[in-house]
Amino acid sequence: METPATPSASATPQKRITEIDTLLPPGAGDALPSEITPATEVALPEAPRKPAPLPTNLPEGALVVPTPEGGYATIRKKAKKVGSGEDEVELRELTPEEKAKKRLRYNLIMWSVCFLILFVVFLVLAWPALFKR
């Protein structure tokens, strides 16, 4: 009786081609998993430096922007003026509180209008059933 030959440990494994391998570009699936080398180690970047303290003597309406060197640059926002003479009005950006209040008022108005439209549509569609004699 002959025993079937067992593959030796030194023999290279044969690659089995699957449907997934046909989707890969040519040459992408040639390496066996045992031949893939681990990625090289890369040093982590250094932690950012502690930022410098904010300047205390800022003019009104100035913006402070951090610079790549770790310092700060001050930007002054010029207010836009509209009109001329006595009608001249200075425009400014709304604060977050003012924006939230304005958004709330707008949302309340929109909800009211939408509810009114739905109520009118309901009345139009239900009119015959409500006053049927």
Image: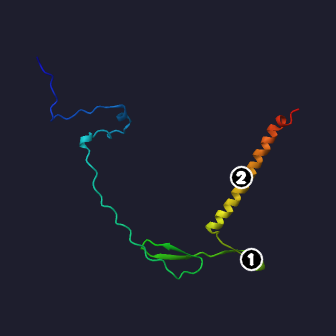
Can you give x and y, in whole percent of width and height, for residue 59 in the image?
A: 57, 81
**Rendering coords of residue 127 (x, y %):** 83, 38
Q: Three-letter amino acid code at disc 1? A: Glu
Identity of the residue drawn at 73% across and 49% down: 114
Q: Is residue 114 above or below residue 64?
A: above
Residue at 34% x, 63% y: name it: 45
Helix, strand or loop at disc 2? Answer: helix
Q: Quadrant of residue 49?
A: bottom left
Query: Which quadrant holds the N terminus?
Result: top left
Q: Write the residue at 27% across / 49% down.
A: 38
**Left or right for 41, reference 129:** left
Q: Nearer the viewer, residue 116 or 44?
A: 116
Please provide percent x and percent y for residue 116: 77, 49
Colour scheme: rainbow
Provide residue 68's location: percent of width, then percent of height. Answer: 43, 71
In the displayed image of the protein, which residue is found farthest to the right?
Answer: 133
Question: Hey, which residue is sitting farthest bottom in the picture?
Answer: 57
Within 10 Å of the Cα at label 2, are there few (<14), some (14-19), or many (20+) other Cα atoms? few
Question: Which residue is at the front of the view, 29 or 125?
Answer: 125
Q: Sequence-wise, which precedes: disc 2 or disc 1?
A: 1
- Please give the label number shown on residue 111: 2
Quadrant of the rendered structure where residue 110 is?
bottom right
**Do the numbered discs 2 and 1 sit on residues whose CB atoms are within 8 Å?**
no
**Which-is-in-front pick, marks 2 and 1?**
2
Residue type at mark 2 is: Trp
Distance from Cα at disc 2 to Cα at disc 1? 36 Å
- Please name the residue that numbered disc 1 is placed on: 88
Residue at the far left: name it. 1
